Amino acid sequence: KSFGLYGSVPLLIATDATRASGMLWLNAAETYVDLVVPEPTVDAGSVGSHWFSESGAMDLILLAGGAHVRDVLAQYAALSGAPVMPNRFALGYHQCRWNYRDDADTRAVDAAFDTYDIPYDVIWLDIEHTDGKRYFTWDLSRFPDPAALQRDVAARGRKMVTIVDPHIKRDEKYSVHTQAQREGFYVKKADGTTDFDGWCWPGSSSYFDFTSAAASRAWAERFVSGYPHFGENLYTWVDMNEPSVFNGPEQTMAKHLRHSGGWEHRDLHNLYGMLVHRATYDGHLLARDYGDRPFVLSRAFFAGSQRYGAVWTGDNAADWGHLRASVPMLLTLQLTAITFSGADVGGFFGNPSPELLVRWYQTAAFQPFFRGHAHLDTDRREPWLFGDEVTQQISAAVRARYSYLPLWYTLFAAAASCVHSSSQAAVHDSSKPPSERDCVPLAFSDANRGAPPMRPLFWHFPQPRTNALWRAEDAWMVGDALLVAPVLEEGVAVHRVFLPRSVAAPTRWFDVGGGGGGGGGGGRGRALLLFSTFVEQNVVHVCSLILVVVVAVIAILVFVVLVIATFVAIAIAIAIAIA
């Protein structure tokens, strides 16, 4: 059984050899889904599903789909919204930790990227940068001049991100709390009038009720006039927005708590995180007078979260299994239109080995959202702390990311496009609220229009549903021409990669990492990306290249045998002639 800890998108996609269709169960209450797989002796092509929601209406939307999964995704995006177009800087590498201790520590990390000549775009500050976990504030004893820090980071073309959580410290000297308490912006207890008091990072806390238009508006306006030192190069990270309540049942809100309009929390739990995301996104628009694309990262999500920014997979661990799990998790999010998503590089908990850290950078460099992050109690793990060889390999992975930024940017524009019946697409103008956006016409191929940037192999290589390609969770496509096949296991000396073949035309693969080609002659050329070595281990091999080597060795042996046979035949002939 699998339980959604951070987010829920109640979308089911079904496929067979000829078509795809889908179903959206639009319900934000706690929901269980049973997939019923028949016995092998029964109809092997039929899989059933049972859906159980604790409350709410049975709002079921069937997506007729078409010949390809992209048809289902296009219909789903028409309902829930197209993904927002990311800022260009947000597609680069992000450096984060809980926590960079103070102004000097932050500046030292920023400067070290230049010292070691490793590109990066954004440095992040976690909850310790605030004044006693009071969000929308700074600890001025640690960060005496936040505006100057932001200006200095921006002078090298970089940005900053700070964290803002929806739980508010109950402190009568804290303006965010006193306003929310006075205006009735908090989630209520079961009586509908008493503010709920839970426990989170600041201690005793209450929670903004984002189902209230007034509360959401007040939250957004904080970014305009209630957040000191919120500068033009500062962006936002929303965490703990499931919501997280340390002393609540299952560490979240009790289901009988009340929201605006009398709704119980049980009715809309899965929606809460997206509403926090939306209000924060709107705050950025207001603060910049709609002149800049917001960048807001959220841990919690629901159907439609793609309209408001990025999502990450939450608190993972420095473990090879978690590295492997990041691939199917992110591929699944791609198929729910939450395209700007990623996993914490190196794992949030624990200390990765140098090998695991290198492999994680190599993997995440070709996933949509690329951020290194670590827990407060872990060892420092900036890229230059593991010796020269590891630093060089991490730097190479990060540089590979930057070499493909034009491709990423184009693919995100295609993913954000509105799908029309004509051959043109359009991208949402994200400088306006979602309800007021126009579509700017853009021309994309059918293969890329509305498609996620990171794609499962079956997206471009349709095969019978029984083909192993449908179950591939260790490789993916970036766009329609770049196959990424990272090393996801420890101590790998030989890395075998499955090269998919198009049924429509021959496919030839080229190793853009410096190897040869494979997969047959003629047809369209596609790129295969492989990272070869970890420190002094053996070079990674592609199956087709191994075959070439084997054939070459056999050819040499045959040649040697022929030469020996020739000399023997000549010797015999001479002996006969003499006789």
Image (tube, rainbow, N blue to C red):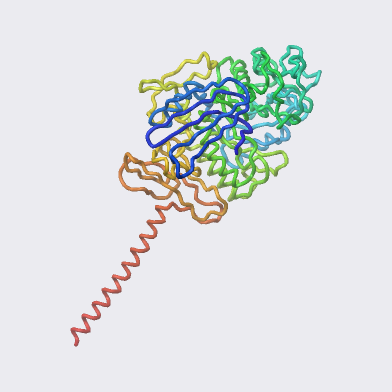
| Depth check, front residue: 9 or 341 | 9
Position above or below: 460 against 492: above
Give x and y (percent) for residue 439. Answer: 45, 17
Position above or below: 435 against 338: above
Q: Quadrant of the N terminus?
A: top right
Q: Quadrant of the C terminus?
A: bottom left
Give x and y (percent) for residue 70. Answer: 43, 30
Position above or below: 436 against 551: above
Identified at 73% across, 11% down, the residue is: 183
Give x and y (percent) for residue 411. Answer: 45, 30
Identified at 60% across, 21% down, the residue is: 56
Is residue 374 visible in the rendered image? The answer is yes
Position above or below: 391 against 91: below
How many numbered marks have been drawn onto this rendered protein structure? Answer: 0
| Depth check, front residue: 103 or 310 | 310
| Depth check, front residue: 140 or 214 | 214
Quadrant position of residue 196 = top right
Is residue 234 visible in the rendered image? The answer is no
Answer with left or right where residue 197 lies relative to residue 265.
right
Answer with left or right where residue 227 lies relative to residue 558.
right
Answer with left or right where residue 95 lies relative to residue 175.
left
Task: Residue at the far front: name it.
Answer: 41
| Depth check, front residue: 173 or 249 | 249
Give x and y (percent) for residue 305. Answer: 56, 25
Identified at 49% across, 18% down, the residue is: 429
